[in-house]
Amino acid sequence: EKYHLGGCRYNGMPGQMVLNQNRILQKYAKVPVFIACNPEQGGNGVCPDGTFVANQIKIGATGKKEYAQAMGRISGAQIKATGCNMAFAPVVDITYNWECEETLNRAYGNDAKMVAEMGKAYMDGLHEFDSVYCCAKHFPGHGDTHADSHLALPSLDLDVREIESVHFEPFRAAVNAGVRAVMTAHIRVPAWGEAPATLNPLILGKLRSLGFDGVIVTDALDMGGFLGWYKTKRHSQIE
């Protein structure tokens, strides 16, 4: 009532407690609140007692889109049951670099077309439930960096043509499939400037140029990739 909350992320509590909390949040909201969860691996990303299915890399290794769709369906059911309404999933980064711990087990694999198809299948399963929406991540693509953005600011040192033709492909597929939200990555792309994607108007414009007109969500703002850049930038401005 005081701060007019527009969005939040669930707390790690049993499903019934998550549901009770979410009912209270929606009860006092003047505008319905986006309440997100992190079901990359199934319902355990909704609440600790939710259903774990598999890491995305394992789903990708099967080559079966129906498994990705089933994981989306299980996630959607448990999101709906707990009163959440936004899934910070699927991960549609392409794992080209095994040193990238950020996405190593979380992405579907290293083939752009397969990742795009798996991501869409997950979305199809989750969107079987009304008023539950996917947020594809992490734009413009985190899978060929050499650092974990939870700890530092990685750099995507690729030619622009490769980024747009390869790493954009799963996001393009998600946009074409009607994804309502996309999460940005705390990574820098030297070809497009020094600021991380989260704060880079040129990179955000690239996302809009794909035809995406939905909600752009940042990755967590307490991550090292964002805080390190922000503190350095702020310190230099003070000096």
Image (spheres, helix red, strand yellow):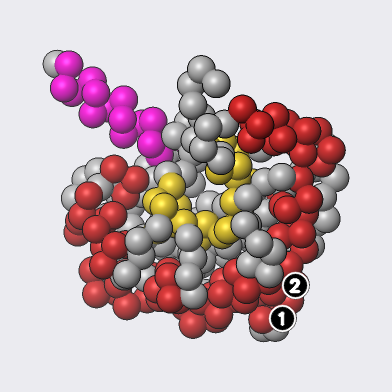
| Left or right position of 86 against 113 | right
Question: Given contact means CB atoms under 8 Å apart, are the residues at marks 1 and 2 in contact?
Answer: yes
**Which residue is at a point 66% across and 62% down the rendered structure image?**
130
At x 35% / y 61%, what residue is drawn?
A: 213
Q: Is 1 above or below relative to 201?
A: above
Considering the image in quadrants, where does the N terminus appear? top right
Q: Tell me the residue at 18%/23% (across/down).
A: 236
> Where does the magenta region start and end?
223-238
Mark 2 secondary-structure assignment: helix
Query: Which residue is nearer to you in this view: 216 or 168?
Result: 216
Would you name the residue on which mark 1 appears? 66
Q: Against 105, is 1 above or below? A: above
Residue 71 placement: quadrant: bottom right
Within-10-Å neighbours for mark 1: few <14, some 14–19, many 20+: some
SS assignment at label 1: helix
Q: Is residue 73 left or right of residue 136?
A: right
Residue denoted by label 2: 70
Question: Is residue 196 positioned above or below 28 on the image?
Answer: below
